[in-house]
Image (tube, grey):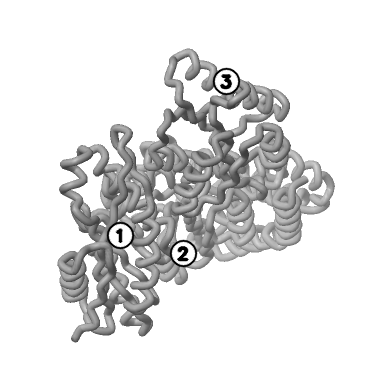
Amino acid sequence: MTHSAAKFQKKIHALADTFIQELQQKTRDIESKWQQYQSDKHTEMLPVLYRKTHGLIGSSQTFGFLELARVAGSLAQSLKPLQQNNGSMNAQQQDQIRQQIQELSHLSNGLEQGLTQNITRMLRGIIYPDSDTSCRIFVVDDDQEAAQELALQLNYFGYEVTVFDCLTAFCAVVKKEPHAIVLMNVEFSEDSLAGIRIMKEIRRELNESVQVMFLASNDDLSVRLEAARAGGAAYLTKPINSSELIDQLDSFIVPQTQEPSRVLMIDDSATMLAYHATVLELAGMVVKTVETLDAVMKTLLAFNPDVILIDVYMPECSGIELAKVIRQIDGLFSVPIVYLAAENDFNTQQEARHLAGDDFLVKPIDPKRLISAVAMRVRRARLLRGLMVRDGLTGLLNHTAIREQLEREIVRSGRLKTPLSLAMVDIDAFKEINDAYGHAAGDRVLKSLARLLKQRLRGTDTVGRYGGDEFAVIMTDTEAPDAANVVNEIRKVFSCLLHISDNQEFNVTFSCGIADIQHFSDAESLSDAADKVLADAKMKGRNQIAVNAGD
């Protein structure tokens, strides 16, 4: 059993124990509320009684106590008409409710029996994350000079690369690290298809797919077919264009390294919140839980969730009412809202959308179903959000989005009294690059710089395409001289990258202007100051960094 699996099972057992410990008090509370209603006939007690009973249905099913859930469901169905009839009931209905409450109380004793079997059944089929998953890259080629040059280009983008010139040595290592990404040369001196042959053998021996991209001088269809049969995910012909190679690697690496999904869960049941949060955290998501209404607003604004899960029944308001309020908050209108509901709370998915939500999940929620549904909603939301704020070519924030982010960061830095710098980066002689090598080559240069900036900067920094061949970098908690040192290191690396167009290799440089809020306090003056010294850097010969100290 993996460490994550053992930890997860331990948490689920602890939550089930907590549920059992709290259950008797909950059933006594239901019994007390019913007796109080019979004595006082206060109809406002009925919604409270119904909500408490309804809450037992999903939690009982979640932990595998199906008979308890059935009785709670029957009691809830008996209580529901009373709310609609203003508490009116006959003797038969009254006796039926009394018997159901007694049965509920009886079942709440002795639930420890069968708990282990219930937990085992719940966990069956869950896929646990592999903590050993790696994004290392193996370059395999008996042409040492070409392999080392390729490794150097990949190192510029922050990848950890190991070079092998011997197939035997590679085979020994890849069997121990099958999750590495393999860049395999097809032709070796002893065999023109040795790279393909060896990957077929490894695939059979390991009985699992190794991610491999084939590099070849031969572009024949027959060779491409053999590479595909060997499990090749890509086939690149030499000379290798590093920009195209990085694009291919991104398709492997980015899904593993993107920011974790941020999930906000709102429910008055601490046990169910903890259970669902544990399941989602197992899948690598970041989860915030809220039990009380007074904490909702603060958490919403501070956490910035990708998706919100709301229980339909809560003490102070319904989940539907809360969703309507959230929809009125600036910046949260498009965040997906998913209701956690019993089977009969909504008739259709369309009804859920009409009531300010996007979807509903029926309790009890299978762990795999919960993870899949939340992940799907986050992917769709991020895709739609990305189409609105991202540049189509580079994937960076577009001009409007980076300007808005700059204004937000200036306000934040002013409030926290922390430094902030803005770097304006512009590719040197970009028109000449387009004229000499074509616009497709120019686009690849832009993508290479965008990728390098994202990989070399901190996660707290923000990069945007300001327009054309100009990029803006917002560097939080950073003064201008420190920002200049960081960007200068990126400048040196970028100038060493090899770009290829029609078998012609060429290098590209950039210039940069930097200003900080110590000297320029608002977004307009800050960007103007950075642009001014960027122009000065261009005039002084390009391929350099200039800082505006406000003198």
Which residue is under mark 1? Answer: 331
Residue that appears at 45% across and 53% down: 156
Which residue is under mark 2? Answer: 316
Towards the viewer: 345 or 94: 345
Mark nearer the viewer, 2 or 1 = 1
Q: What secondary structure is found at the residue carrying circle 2?
A: loop
* Residue neighbourhood size for the residue with mark 2, other residues' Cα within 10 Å, grouped as few (<14), some (14–19), many (≥20): few
* The residue positioned farthest toward the top in the image shown: 222
Which amino acid is tagged 1?
Gly
Mark nearer the viewer, 3 or 1 = 3
Number of numbered discs on residues: 3
> Does the rendering let one see residue 95?
no
Mark nearer the viewer, 3 or 2 = 3
Which amino acid is tagged 2?
Glu
Residue that appears at 28% across and 84% down: 518
Q: Position of residue 238 (x, y in %)?
A: 42, 31
Q: Position of residue 280 (x, y in %)?
A: 58, 51
Q: Which mark is residue 193?
A: 3
Residue that appears at 58% across and 34% down: 142
Marks 2 and 1 sit apart, C-alpha to C-alpha, by: 24 Å
Give the mark nearest the N terminus, 3 or 2. 3
* Residue neighbourhood size for the residue with mark 3, other residues' Cα within 10 Å, grouped as few (<14), some (14–19), many (≥20): some
- Which corner quadrant holds the C terminus? bottom left
Task: Indicate left or right for 188 with 514 as reference.
Answer: right
Q: Position of residue 126 (x, y in %)?
A: 66, 40
Marks 3 and 2 sit apart, C-alpha to C-alpha, by: 70 Å
Marks 3 and 1 sit apart, C-alpha to C-alpha, by: 56 Å
